[in-house]
Structures are given as structure tokens and as C-alpha cells.
Amino acid sequence: MKTTYYLLLEQIKGWFKRHHHHKAVIGLSGGVDSALCLKLCCDALGAKNVTALMMPEKGLTKEKNIQDALNWAKKLRVKHFLVEINPHLESYHHLAWKQSKIALMNTKARARAVLLYNYANSNNAIVVGTSNKSELMLGYGTKYGDLASDVMIIGDLLKTEIMEISRYLKLPPSIIRKRPSAELTVGQTDEADLGASYSKLDSILKRVLKGEKLNKKDNLVKKTLQRIEKQKHKRGPVPVLELKE
């Protein structure tokens, strides 16, 4: 893990230098992915160049997650702001059509992205994405929401690897132990949405990455491969249809 840590710092420093930026802003949820991203950016860029935005939804986001995020931001001594997203969702309750549950959930993620980019544009900062490789491969994220960023610094680490490096860096146990959740609706957890634990999913994803043959009769393997294929539109740039004569 030590080698991975220093490689990550090197990559972050190099990317920011190449793109002529030195400030970063991160959406801090109280979960392990964003907590790790904040730690890495502080170590690579210096805490004075990193800002955390905590964007809870009043009435839904657990107080524990808000407090964990706040305590971590204070411990790392980064500038931080708490902005409830409820006012930004108000207009969506008065649409001319009936919005679906998934539409409302995705709107919450996109409202947070808008706030991150508003801060970034106002302070000449880069929006750092917090998605990991497991989420990216499975398409577990919202387009123009939590998938919206300028650089994804942990996007080449599977969730199980995120947990390993977080333990190595001694992130707060209260953050590491909690069940991953986007908190877009009551009782939501990542693993319930995905249908299996990250450890089981990552064991399949590792084999996919190695190009190994998989038993497609296994129900979880079959569903995982189907999900990877169905969600591949989230992993690339928006396609441009070419007019060829």
C-alpha cells in the first residue's frame, strides 16, 4: 500500500502541474471514498489548496455522516462549507410532469455537481471526482452528477483496494466501517443496489480486467457482466454521430 500511496501522490501532483492548477474542491459525504480523496489531495497539494463541500439533504442525510465529514475536514485543516441541497431541489417539486423516483435521485446528485462547479469556477479550482474503479466499471453513478468531475484520482482503485489504502493511511474507523451509501433515498446502500458485496463484485471485476474466462451460468457473474455492458455508455465521452456520405 505504501507504493500505491506514493504513486497516487505523484500522479495527482503531475496532473495538476500539467493542467496549470493548484486548487481542488471535493464533495465530502462522510463516506470512505471522498474521505480518502480529501486526504490524498491534502498530501499532494497542501491543505491550504483544498476545499471540501458538504452537501447534505436535510431530512435524509444521516447526522452521523455530516459529523464524520465535518470532523475529517477539521482534522485535515481544509476550508470547508456546509450547503444543504434542499432549496436547490424545491423547483423540481413543481414540474409540469410527474418525475420518477430515479429522476429525483439523480437530480440530487446533479445538484451537488452544480454546487461543486459553481465553487470551482468562482475560485479557479478543479473538481476532484470521488468514484472508484468498481463503481466506474459497473456504471454505478449519475451522469453529470457524482460522475461529473475534472479528474478522478481513485478511479483506478477497486473498492476493496480503497478500503486497504484507507486503513493504511489510518482514516477514521467510523468512516471506514460504515456501509457505503449514496444517500439518495431512505435506506439506500450501494451493495443492496448492486446485489452483492463489494468483495464478491471485485473478485469478478478483477477476473474481467485480467481477461479470464468466467462461468456465465453463475447468476452473479451473469448479472455483473450484463451490468458492465448495459452501463458502458457512462464510461466514455458523449458520442458524436458522424455524417458520412
Image (cartoon, rainbow, N blue to C red):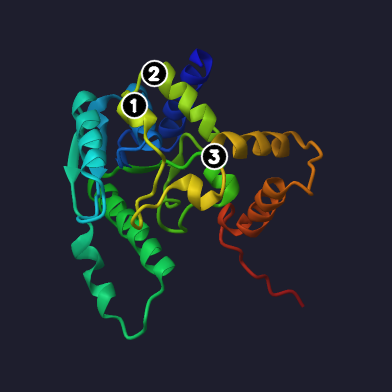
Q: Which residue is mark 1?
A: 39
Instruction: Classify mark 3: residues with Cα within 10 Å, few (<14), some (14-19) or many (20+).
Output: few
Write down the residue under mark 3: 197
Q: Amino acid at mark 1?
A: Lys
Q: Image quadrant of residue 21?
A: top left
**Element type at mark 1:** helix
Q: Residue at x 61, y 36 (%)?
A: 200
**What amino acid is at disc 2?**
Leu
SS class, disc 3: loop
Depth check, mark 2 against mark 1: the one in front is: 2
Kind of residue indicated by mark 3: Ser
Q: CA distance from mark 2 to mark 3?
A: 23 Å
Q: Tell me the residue at 61%/63% (across/down).
A: 239
Query: Which of the two labelled residues, at mark 2 and mark 3, occupies the earlier sequence position?
Result: 2
Give the side of residue 73 with respect to residue 44, left or right. left
Which of discs 3 and 1 lies nearer the camera? The answer is 3
Q: Residue 125 placed where, x, y %?
A: 30, 42
Q: Mark 2 and mark 1 in contact? Answer it, CB < 8 Å.
A: yes
Distance between mark 3 and mark 1 Cα atoms: 25 Å
Q: From the top left corner, tell me how far across and down residue 87 is, in percent.
A: 18, 64
Q: Are marks 3 and 1 in contact (CB under 8 Å)?
A: no
Front position in the image: 209 or 226: 226
Toward the bottom, the furthest residue is 96
User: Against 223, is 70 above or below?
Assistant: above
Report the mark closest to the observer, 2 or 3: 3
Q: Point out residue 185 in the picture as x, y percentages from the top left corner.
A: 35, 58
The residue singled out by tag 2 in the image is 169
In the displayed structure, would residue 224 be above or below residue 51? below
Does the image show residue 20? Answer: no
State the residue at coordinates (75%, 46%): 218
Nearer the N terminus, badge 3 or badge 1? Answer: 1
The answer to whether residue 71 shows anywhere in this view is yes
